[in-house]
Image: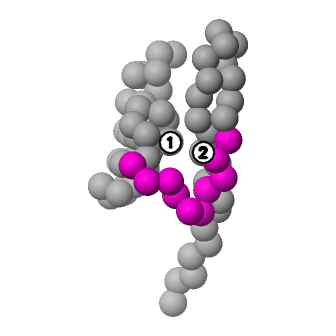
Amino acid sequence: MTARQYLIQEVAAALGEGADGEDVVDLVIRTGWQPRPLPDPHSDHLEGVLADGRRVPIEIRRARLTHAG
């Protein structure tokens, strides 16, 4: 699967689950199509190395719990 196909699949799934605009933007950032303009203070940031030697940023988003009510 190409990166573009993966993005399309992820966006389609998110929209099917009722994603809003913010959810779609986060998805585009998470899949690597657009870097986050400001670092997310709730994430850990690392640097990874791909098989071809290219260095890439890695953002690990911590789970956020929400409470209904």
Q: Nearer the viewer, residue 24 or 47?
A: 47
Badge 1 amino acid: Arg
Magenta segment includes 7: no
Q: Position of residue 1 (x, y in %)?
A: 51, 16
The image's colour scheme reads: one colour
Q: CA distance from mark 1 to mark 2?
A: 8 Å
- Please identify the residue farthest to the top as the structure is shown: 52
Q: Position of residue 2 (x, y in %)?
A: 47, 16
Chain part drawn in magenta: 37-46
Dot 2 alpha-carbon crowd within 10 angstroms: few under 14, some 14 to 19, many 20 or more: many
What residue does disc 2 label? 59
Q: Nearer the viewer, residue 62 or 6?
A: 62
Residues under numbered marks 1 and 2 in contact, where contact means CB atoms less than 8 Å apart: yes
For the image, the number of numbered tags is 2
Magenta stretch, main secondary structure, is loop
Point out which mark residue 52 bears. Answer: none
What residue does disc 1 label? 30
Q: Position of residue 28 (x, y in %)?
A: 40, 40
Nearer the observer, disc 1 or disc 2? 2
Residue under the point 57% across and 81% down: 67
Give the SS element for disc 1: helix
Residue under the point 56% across and 62% down: 41
Q: Position of residue 37 (x, y in %)?
A: 39, 49
Give the SS element for disc 2: strand
Q: Sequence order check: which comes first, mark 1 or mark 2?
A: 1
Badge 2 amino acid: Glu
Q: Is residue 50 visible?
A: yes
Residue under the point 65% across and 59% down: 62
User: On the rendered structure, is 39 left or right of 51?
Assistant: left
